[in-house]
Amino acid sequence: MRPLLLFVFVPFVALADDASDWAKEKVRAQREGLSAKPPPAVETDSSGPTVWRERTIIPFWKEKLPGGPSLVPSFTPPTSLAPLVRAVRSGVVNISAKNGGSSKGLGSGFVITSDGLVVTNNHVIERAESIVVRTADGKSFEAQVVGRDPETDLALLRLTDARDLVVVTLGDSDDLEVGDWVVAIGNPFGLDTSVTHGLISARERVIGVGPFDDFIQTNALINPGNSGGPLFDMKGHVVGVTTAIMNQGQGIGFAVPVNLVKELLPNLRDNGTPVRGWLGVTVVESKEADEATIVDVYPESPAARAGLKPGDRLVSVNGKPVDRYQQLLRRIAIQGPGVVVRLGIVRGGKVINASALLSTRPAAGPSKVMASGGRIDALGLVLTELEPSQGQGVHVEAIAPGSVAELGGLAVGDLIVEANRVKVASIRQLQELVAQTPAGEPILLKFTRADAARYVALKRRDGS
Protein backbone atom coordinates (compact mmCIF):
# COMPACT_ATOMS: atom_id res chain seq x y z
CA MET A 1 0.00 0.00 0.00
CA ARG A 2 1.43 3.33 -0.98
CA PRO A 3 1.87 5.88 1.78
CA LEU A 4 -0.40 8.81 1.60
CA LEU A 5 1.42 12.05 0.98
CA LEU A 6 -0.41 15.08 2.26
CA PHE A 7 0.61 18.44 0.80
CA VAL A 8 -0.45 21.54 2.68
CA PHE A 9 -0.15 24.86 0.88
CA VAL A 10 0.16 27.86 3.23
CA PRO A 11 -0.81 31.22 1.70
CA PHE A 12 2.47 33.04 2.48
CA VAL A 13 1.55 36.02 0.36
CA ALA A 14 -1.68 36.53 2.25
CA LEU A 15 0.11 36.32 5.62
CA ALA A 16 2.70 38.83 4.49
CA ASP A 17 0.00 41.24 3.38
CA ASP A 18 -1.77 40.96 6.73
CA ALA A 19 1.49 41.63 8.63
CA SER A 20 2.18 44.66 6.45
CA ASP A 21 -1.26 46.10 7.12
CA TRP A 22 -0.88 45.50 10.86
CA ALA A 23 2.53 47.28 10.93
CA LYS A 24 1.19 50.24 8.96
CA GLU A 25 -1.69 50.60 11.41
CA LYS A 26 0.70 50.63 14.36
CA VAL A 27 2.90 53.30 12.78
CA ARG A 28 -0.16 55.45 12.02
CA ALA A 29 -1.42 55.17 15.60
CA GLN A 30 1.99 56.04 16.98
CA ARG A 31 2.26 59.15 14.78
CA GLU A 32 -1.19 60.31 15.86
CA GLY A 33 -0.17 59.86 19.49
CA LEU A 34 2.98 61.94 19.06
CA SER A 35 1.19 64.77 17.28
CA ALA A 36 -1.63 64.96 19.81
CA LYS A 37 -1.55 67.96 22.18
CA PRO A 38 -0.93 67.17 25.86
CA PRO A 39 -3.80 67.69 28.25
CA PRO A 40 -3.96 71.16 29.80
CA ALA A 41 -2.16 71.68 33.10
CA VAL A 42 -5.39 72.28 35.00
CA GLU A 43 -7.61 70.46 37.38
CA THR A 44 -11.28 69.58 37.04
CA ASP A 45 -13.71 70.83 39.58
CA SER A 46 -13.52 69.38 43.03
CA SER A 47 -16.27 66.88 42.33
CA GLY A 48 -14.49 65.34 39.36
CA PRO A 49 -11.28 63.30 39.12
CA THR A 50 -7.86 65.05 38.75
CA VAL A 51 -6.61 64.93 35.19
CA TRP A 52 -3.28 66.85 35.56
CA ARG A 53 -1.39 68.50 38.42
CA GLU A 54 1.71 70.67 37.77
CA ARG A 55 4.44 70.30 40.37
CA THR A 56 5.63 73.52 41.98
CA ILE A 57 9.43 73.55 42.68
CA ILE A 58 10.55 75.70 45.59
CA PRO A 59 14.30 76.50 45.15
CA PHE A 60 16.51 75.79 48.14
CA TRP A 61 19.48 77.47 46.43
CA LYS A 62 20.37 81.07 45.61
CA GLU A 63 18.42 81.82 42.45
CA LYS A 64 19.01 84.58 39.90
CA LEU A 65 16.04 86.93 39.96
CA PRO A 66 14.51 87.97 36.62
CA GLY A 67 15.95 91.36 35.76
CA GLY A 68 18.03 91.31 38.95
CA PRO A 69 21.33 93.18 39.38
CA SER A 70 24.72 91.73 38.43
CA LEU A 71 26.66 90.07 41.24
CA VAL A 72 29.72 92.04 40.09
CA PRO A 73 28.42 95.47 39.02
CA SER A 74 31.88 96.84 38.16
CA PHE A 75 32.82 93.91 35.91
CA THR A 76 32.40 94.28 32.17
CA PRO A 77 33.74 91.36 30.12
CA PRO A 78 35.81 92.50 27.14
CA THR A 79 34.08 92.11 23.81
CA SER A 80 37.43 92.06 21.98
CA LEU A 81 41.11 92.04 22.90
CA ALA A 82 42.11 93.59 19.57
CA PRO A 83 42.71 97.12 20.96
CA LEU A 84 45.00 95.76 23.67
CA VAL A 85 46.94 93.56 21.23
CA ARG A 86 47.43 96.46 18.81
CA ALA A 87 48.77 98.63 21.64
CA VAL A 88 51.40 96.19 22.92
CA ARG A 89 52.53 93.83 20.16
CA SER A 90 55.11 96.26 18.72
CA GLY A 91 57.27 95.68 21.80
CA VAL A 92 57.37 91.90 21.32
CA VAL A 93 60.29 90.36 19.39
CA ASN A 94 61.17 87.01 17.83
CA ILE A 95 64.52 85.44 18.68
CA SER A 96 66.54 83.02 16.56
CA ALA A 97 69.55 81.48 18.31
CA LYS A 98 72.05 79.44 16.28
CA ASN A 99 74.32 76.92 17.91
CA GLY A 100 76.73 76.09 15.10
CA GLY A 101 75.88 74.18 11.95
CA SER A 102 72.16 74.01 11.24
CA SER A 103 71.05 73.86 14.87
CA LYS A 104 68.66 76.73 15.59
CA GLY A 105 66.41 77.56 18.50
CA LEU A 106 63.39 79.83 18.38
CA GLY A 107 62.04 81.96 21.17
CA SER A 108 60.41 85.23 22.06
CA GLY A 109 61.26 88.33 24.07
CA PHE A 110 60.24 91.91 24.74
CA VAL A 111 61.97 95.28 24.50
CA ILE A 112 62.43 97.23 27.76
CA THR A 113 64.59 100.16 26.57
CA SER A 114 64.45 102.11 23.32
CA ASP A 115 68.19 101.50 22.73
CA GLY A 116 67.70 97.75 22.55
CA LEU A 117 67.68 95.90 25.89
CA VAL A 118 65.54 92.76 25.52
CA VAL A 119 64.34 90.27 28.14
CA THR A 120 63.98 86.58 27.27
CA ASN A 121 64.51 83.13 28.79
CA ASN A 122 68.00 81.83 29.47
CA HIS A 123 67.21 78.46 27.89
CA VAL A 124 66.44 80.21 24.58
CA ILE A 125 70.01 81.55 24.19
CA GLU A 126 72.24 79.66 26.63
CA ARG A 127 74.11 77.62 23.96
CA ALA A 128 73.86 80.14 21.15
CA GLU A 129 76.87 81.15 19.06
CA SER A 130 74.87 83.84 17.27
CA ILE A 131 71.55 85.53 18.07
CA VAL A 132 69.27 87.40 15.66
CA VAL A 133 66.28 89.35 16.96
CA ARG A 134 63.45 90.46 14.68
CA THR A 135 61.07 93.20 15.78
CA ALA A 136 57.37 93.39 14.99
CA ASP A 137 57.97 95.77 12.06
CA GLY A 138 60.26 93.22 10.38
CA LYS A 139 63.67 94.73 11.23
CA SER A 140 66.43 92.30 12.21
CA PHE A 141 69.26 92.95 14.68
CA GLU A 142 72.22 90.96 15.88
CA ALA A 143 72.20 90.62 19.65
CA GLN A 144 74.72 89.97 22.42
CA VAL A 145 74.10 88.54 25.87
CA VAL A 146 74.40 91.19 28.59
CA GLY A 147 73.64 88.83 31.44
CA ARG A 148 71.84 85.63 32.20
CA ASP A 149 70.72 83.61 35.21
CA PRO A 150 70.07 79.88 34.79
CA GLU A 151 68.46 79.60 38.22
CA THR A 152 65.60 81.96 37.30
CA ASP A 153 65.82 81.12 33.56
CA LEU A 154 66.12 84.79 32.62
CA ALA A 155 68.47 86.55 30.22
CA LEU A 156 69.11 90.13 29.14
CA LEU A 157 70.16 90.89 25.55
CA ARG A 158 71.36 94.05 23.81
CA LEU A 159 70.53 94.65 20.14
CA THR A 160 73.33 96.05 17.99
CA ASP A 161 72.79 99.55 16.54
CA ALA A 162 69.22 99.75 17.80
CA ARG A 163 67.51 103.04 18.55
CA ASP A 164 64.01 104.42 18.99
CA LEU A 165 62.48 100.99 19.54
CA VAL A 166 58.96 100.57 20.88
CA VAL A 167 59.11 99.36 24.47
CA VAL A 168 56.67 97.52 26.73
CA THR A 169 55.61 98.67 30.19
CA LEU A 170 56.39 96.43 33.16
CA GLY A 171 53.51 96.02 35.60
CA ASP A 172 53.12 94.69 39.15
CA SER A 173 52.67 90.92 39.36
CA ASP A 174 51.79 91.19 43.07
CA ASP A 175 48.49 92.79 42.01
CA LEU A 176 47.42 89.70 40.07
CA GLU A 177 44.51 87.64 41.32
CA VAL A 178 43.42 84.15 40.37
CA GLY A 179 40.84 84.60 37.60
CA ASP A 180 42.39 87.72 36.04
CA TRP A 181 42.48 87.77 32.23
CA VAL A 182 45.93 87.66 30.58
CA VAL A 183 47.28 87.67 27.02
CA ALA A 184 50.43 85.88 25.82
CA ILE A 185 52.19 87.05 22.64
CA GLY A 186 55.10 85.17 21.12
CA ASN A 187 56.63 83.15 18.34
CA PRO A 188 55.32 79.56 18.70
CA PHE A 189 56.80 77.24 16.07
CA GLY A 190 58.08 80.33 14.23
CA LEU A 191 54.60 81.82 13.76
CA ASP A 192 55.27 85.52 14.32
CA THR A 193 53.34 87.53 16.89
CA SER A 194 50.83 84.81 17.74
CA VAL A 195 48.30 85.80 20.41
CA THR A 196 46.60 83.57 22.98
CA HIS A 197 44.58 84.50 26.02
CA GLY A 198 43.45 82.89 29.24
CA LEU A 199 43.27 83.30 32.99
CA ILE A 200 45.58 83.35 35.96
CA SER A 201 45.08 79.82 37.31
CA ALA A 202 47.33 80.08 40.38
CA ARG A 203 50.19 82.08 41.90
CA GLU A 204 53.46 81.17 43.65
CA ARG A 205 53.59 77.74 42.00
CA VAL A 206 56.62 75.61 42.89
CA ILE A 207 57.33 73.20 40.02
CA GLY A 208 60.76 71.92 41.09
CA VAL A 209 63.03 73.58 38.54
CA GLY A 210 65.21 75.50 40.99
CA PRO A 211 65.55 77.31 44.31
CA PHE A 212 63.72 80.40 43.04
CA ASP A 213 60.50 78.67 41.99
CA ASP A 214 57.74 81.28 42.16
CA PHE A 215 55.67 80.85 39.01
CA ILE A 216 52.42 82.29 37.76
CA GLN A 217 50.24 79.48 36.38
CA THR A 218 48.02 80.31 33.41
CA ASN A 219 45.83 78.48 30.93
CA ALA A 220 46.80 80.86 28.11
CA LEU A 221 48.31 78.51 25.53
CA ILE A 222 52.11 78.44 25.62
CA ASN A 223 53.90 76.44 22.93
CA PRO A 224 57.54 75.90 21.93
CA GLY A 225 58.77 79.26 20.68
CA ASN A 226 56.68 81.23 23.20
CA SER A 227 59.50 80.95 25.74
CA GLY A 228 60.72 84.36 26.86
CA GLY A 229 57.66 86.19 25.59
CA PRO A 230 55.53 88.57 27.64
CA LEU A 231 52.34 87.83 29.54
CA PHE A 232 50.15 90.96 29.56
CA ASP A 233 47.35 91.97 31.89
CA MET A 234 44.23 93.77 30.70
CA LYS A 235 45.92 97.15 31.16
CA GLY A 236 48.63 96.25 28.66
CA HIS A 237 51.34 95.81 31.30
CA VAL A 238 53.79 92.91 31.31
CA VAL A 239 53.13 90.79 34.40
CA GLY A 240 55.21 87.72 33.54
CA VAL A 241 57.70 86.00 31.23
CA THR A 242 56.27 82.83 29.68
CA THR A 243 58.72 80.08 30.52
CA ALA A 244 57.45 76.52 30.87
CA ILE A 245 54.61 74.15 30.08
CA MET A 246 53.48 70.86 31.58
CA ASN A 247 53.77 68.24 28.86
CA GLN A 248 51.34 65.85 30.53
CA GLY A 249 48.48 68.36 30.51
CA GLN A 250 46.77 70.95 28.36
CA GLY A 251 46.34 74.58 29.26
CA ILE A 252 48.94 74.44 32.04
CA GLY A 253 51.66 77.01 31.49
CA PHE A 254 53.99 78.92 33.77
CA ALA A 255 55.47 82.41 33.73
CA VAL A 256 58.16 84.10 35.84
CA PRO A 257 56.52 86.99 37.76
CA VAL A 258 57.63 90.36 36.43
CA ASN A 259 58.40 91.64 39.95
CA LEU A 260 61.15 89.02 40.23
CA VAL A 261 62.38 90.12 36.79
CA LYS A 262 62.55 93.76 37.90
CA GLU A 263 64.54 92.85 40.99
CA LEU A 264 67.03 90.85 38.91
CA LEU A 265 67.50 93.20 35.93
CA PRO A 266 69.96 95.66 37.60
CA ASN A 267 72.03 92.69 38.75
CA LEU A 268 72.18 91.25 35.22
CA ARG A 269 72.93 94.59 33.59
CA ASP A 270 75.71 95.50 36.03
CA ASN A 271 77.31 92.11 36.74
CA GLY A 272 76.53 89.94 33.71
CA THR A 273 75.99 86.91 35.89
CA PRO A 274 73.96 87.43 39.04
CA VAL A 275 75.97 87.97 42.20
CA ARG A 276 73.71 86.80 44.99
CA GLY A 277 73.17 88.93 48.04
CA TRP A 278 73.88 87.34 51.44
CA LEU A 279 72.23 88.13 54.77
CA GLY A 280 73.97 85.57 56.98
CA VAL A 281 71.23 83.80 58.92
CA THR A 282 69.97 80.27 59.34
CA VAL A 283 66.21 79.96 59.70
CA VAL A 284 63.69 77.22 60.40
CA GLU A 285 60.02 77.15 59.51
CA SER A 286 57.37 76.71 62.17
CA LYS A 287 54.72 74.01 61.86
CA GLU A 288 52.28 75.97 64.01
CA ALA A 289 52.42 79.27 62.11
CA ASP A 290 53.56 80.67 58.78
CA GLU A 291 56.84 82.16 59.91
CA ALA A 292 60.60 81.83 59.52
CA THR A 293 62.51 81.90 62.80
CA ILE A 294 66.22 82.74 62.98
CA VAL A 295 68.21 80.03 64.77
CA ASP A 296 71.73 81.22 63.96
CA VAL A 297 73.40 84.49 62.92
CA TYR A 298 76.82 84.37 61.25
CA PRO A 299 79.41 86.56 63.01
CA GLU A 300 80.30 89.78 61.14
CA SER A 301 77.48 89.10 58.67
CA PRO A 302 75.01 91.72 57.40
CA ALA A 303 72.42 90.22 59.77
CA ALA A 304 74.77 90.56 62.74
CA ARG A 305 75.56 94.18 61.86
CA ALA A 306 71.83 94.89 61.55
CA GLY A 307 71.25 93.58 65.07
CA LEU A 308 69.36 90.40 64.24
CA LYS A 309 69.41 87.70 66.93
CA PRO A 310 68.53 84.01 67.22
CA GLY A 311 64.85 83.71 68.08
CA ASP A 312 63.81 86.68 65.93
CA ARG A 313 60.99 85.94 63.53
CA LEU A 314 61.49 87.36 60.04
CA VAL A 315 58.11 88.51 58.74
CA SER A 316 58.94 90.80 55.81
CA VAL A 317 61.65 91.90 53.38
CA ASN A 318 61.21 95.29 51.70
CA GLY A 319 57.62 95.36 52.86
CA LYS A 320 56.75 91.98 51.32
CA PRO A 321 55.68 89.18 53.68
CA VAL A 322 58.00 86.26 54.40
CA ASP A 323 56.71 83.08 55.99
CA ARG A 324 58.90 80.39 54.42
CA TYR A 325 62.59 79.80 53.90
CA GLN A 326 62.11 79.71 50.12
CA GLN A 327 60.50 83.15 50.20
CA LEU A 328 63.37 84.55 52.28
CA LEU A 329 65.92 83.02 49.91
CA ARG A 330 64.20 84.60 46.89
CA ARG A 331 63.81 88.00 48.50
CA ILE A 332 67.46 88.19 49.59
CA ALA A 333 69.45 86.24 47.00
CA ILE A 334 67.80 87.97 44.05
CA GLN A 335 69.33 91.25 45.26
CA GLY A 336 72.95 92.07 44.54
CA PRO A 337 75.62 92.85 47.12
CA GLY A 338 75.62 96.43 48.32
CA VAL A 339 71.81 96.64 48.30
CA VAL A 340 70.10 97.78 51.49
CA VAL A 341 67.04 95.71 52.41
CA ARG A 342 64.37 96.62 54.93
CA LEU A 343 63.59 93.78 57.34
CA GLY A 344 60.53 93.32 59.51
CA ILE A 345 61.17 91.15 62.56
CA VAL A 346 59.16 90.16 65.62
CA ARG A 347 61.05 89.99 68.90
CA GLY A 348 59.32 89.46 72.22
CA GLY A 349 55.95 90.10 70.64
CA LYS A 350 57.00 93.49 69.27
CA VAL A 351 57.51 94.37 65.61
CA ILE A 352 60.95 95.85 64.95
CA ASN A 353 62.17 97.35 61.68
CA ALA A 354 65.80 96.91 60.69
CA SER A 355 67.97 97.59 57.64
CA ALA A 356 70.77 95.36 56.40
CA LEU A 357 73.43 96.07 53.78
CA LEU A 358 73.77 92.81 51.85
CA SER A 359 77.23 91.47 51.09
CA THR A 360 78.66 88.84 48.78
CA ARG A 361 78.26 85.28 49.93
CA PRO A 362 81.56 84.30 51.52
CA ALA A 363 83.55 81.60 49.77
CA ALA A 364 84.08 78.36 51.62
CA GLY A 365 87.47 78.86 53.20
CA PRO A 366 89.66 76.93 55.64
CA SER A 367 86.75 76.34 57.97
CA LYS A 368 85.14 73.20 59.24
CA VAL A 369 83.36 73.04 55.88
CA MET A 370 86.69 72.31 54.23
CA ALA A 371 88.31 70.44 57.11
CA SER A 372 85.58 68.00 57.97
CA GLY A 373 85.82 64.36 56.97
CA GLY A 374 82.03 64.22 56.65
CA ARG A 375 81.90 66.43 53.57
CA ILE A 376 79.94 65.92 50.39
CA ASP A 377 81.52 68.56 48.20
CA ALA A 378 79.17 68.00 45.27
CA LEU A 379 76.28 69.18 47.45
CA GLY A 380 78.16 71.53 49.78
CA LEU A 381 77.27 69.58 52.94
CA VAL A 382 79.15 68.83 56.16
CA LEU A 383 77.56 65.94 58.03
CA THR A 384 77.83 64.12 61.34
CA GLU A 385 76.44 60.72 62.23
CA LEU A 386 73.94 60.06 64.98
CA GLU A 387 74.53 57.89 67.98
CA PRO A 388 72.85 54.47 67.64
CA SER A 389 70.36 55.44 70.32
CA GLN A 390 69.32 58.56 68.39
CA GLY A 391 67.85 56.73 65.42
CA GLN A 392 68.77 56.65 61.74
CA GLY A 393 70.03 59.39 59.45
CA VAL A 394 72.87 61.91 59.15
CA HIS A 395 72.87 65.35 60.71
CA VAL A 396 73.63 68.54 58.72
CA GLU A 397 76.45 70.18 60.66
CA ALA A 398 77.34 72.94 58.17
CA ILE A 399 76.51 74.12 54.66
CA ALA A 400 78.91 75.76 52.24
CA PRO A 401 77.65 79.26 51.31
CA GLY A 402 76.35 79.36 47.75
CA SER A 403 76.23 75.57 47.47
CA VAL A 404 73.38 73.62 45.90
CA ALA A 405 72.39 72.47 49.39
CA GLU A 406 71.94 76.06 50.56
CA LEU A 407 70.17 77.14 47.37
CA GLY A 408 67.91 74.10 47.66
CA GLY A 409 66.76 75.11 51.13
CA LEU A 410 68.66 72.74 53.44
CA ALA A 411 69.64 74.23 56.79
CA VAL A 412 71.97 73.44 59.65
CA GLY A 413 70.20 71.05 61.99
CA ASP A 414 68.28 69.15 59.30
CA LEU A 415 68.35 65.35 59.52
CA ILE A 416 68.77 63.55 56.17
CA VAL A 417 67.02 60.18 56.36
CA GLU A 418 66.72 59.07 52.72
CA ALA A 419 68.47 59.56 49.38
CA ASN A 420 66.76 58.44 46.17
CA ARG A 421 64.20 56.53 48.27
CA VAL A 422 66.97 54.58 50.08
CA LYS A 423 67.24 54.94 53.86
CA VAL A 424 70.50 56.54 54.94
CA ALA A 425 72.36 55.07 57.90
CA SER A 426 75.82 56.63 57.51
CA ILE A 427 77.77 59.41 55.81
CA ARG A 428 79.63 56.88 53.69
CA GLN A 429 76.35 55.42 52.41
CA LEU A 430 75.07 58.87 51.46
CA GLN A 431 78.36 59.67 49.69
CA GLU A 432 78.02 56.46 47.67
CA LEU A 433 74.40 57.22 46.75
CA VAL A 434 75.38 60.69 45.55
CA ALA A 435 78.27 59.26 43.53
CA GLN A 436 75.95 56.69 41.93
CA THR A 437 73.52 59.34 40.74
CA PRO A 438 74.13 59.97 37.01
CA ALA A 439 75.64 63.34 36.14
CA GLY A 440 73.00 65.94 35.39
CA GLU A 441 70.26 64.11 37.28
CA PRO A 442 69.02 65.33 40.67
CA ILE A 443 69.37 63.35 43.86
CA LEU A 444 66.18 63.28 45.92
CA LEU A 445 66.81 63.82 49.63
CA LYS A 446 64.25 63.28 52.36
CA PHE A 447 65.00 65.19 55.54
CA THR A 448 63.24 66.18 58.74
CA ARG A 449 63.06 69.62 60.30
CA ALA A 450 61.06 70.44 63.42
CA ASP A 451 59.53 66.93 63.27
CA ALA A 452 58.19 67.59 59.75
CA ALA A 453 59.35 65.46 56.82
CA ARG A 454 60.36 67.29 53.62
CA TYR A 455 61.90 66.51 50.24
CA VAL A 456 64.38 68.39 48.08
CA ALA A 457 65.96 67.51 44.72
CA LEU A 458 69.55 68.69 44.32
CA LYS A 459 71.78 68.54 41.24
CA ARG A 460 75.34 67.88 42.31
CA ARG A 461 78.22 70.06 41.23
CA ASP A 462 80.94 67.69 40.12
CA GLY A 463 84.46 68.78 40.78
CA SER A 464 83.43 71.34 43.37
Image (cartoon, rainbow, N blue to C red):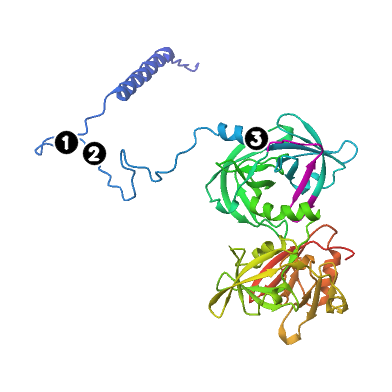
The number of callouts visible is 3
**Front position in the image: 59 or 150:** 150
SS state under label 2: loop
Judge from the rendering whether residue 417 lies leftward or rightward of residue 62; answer left or right.
right
Mark 1 Cα-neighbour bin, 10 Å: few <14, some 14–19, many ≥20: few
**Does residue 331 lie above or below 352 as drawn?**
above
**Does residue 296 lie above or below 377 as drawn?**
below
Q: CA distance from mark 3 to mark 1?
A: 67 Å
The magenta region covers 147-166
Q: Which residue is mark 2?
A: 54
Kindly identify the amino acid type of the residue bearing the numbered disc 3.
Answer: Arg
Question: Magenta stretch: residue 455 in it?
Answer: no
Quadrant in the picture for residue 210 = bottom right
Res 43 label: 1
Is residue 55 something that shows in the picture? yes
Q: Residue 377 at x, y = what percent?
A: 85, 70
Residue at 21% across, 36% down? 52
Judge from the rendering whether residue 135 lies leftward or rightward of residue 5; answer left or right.
right
Kindly identify the amino acid type of the residue bearing the numbered disc 2.
Answer: Glu
- Return the residue found at the far left: 47
Q: Quadrant of the C terminus?
A: bottom right
Quadrant in the picture for residue 371 = bottom right
Res 89 label: 3
Q: CA distance from mark 2 to mark 3?
A: 59 Å
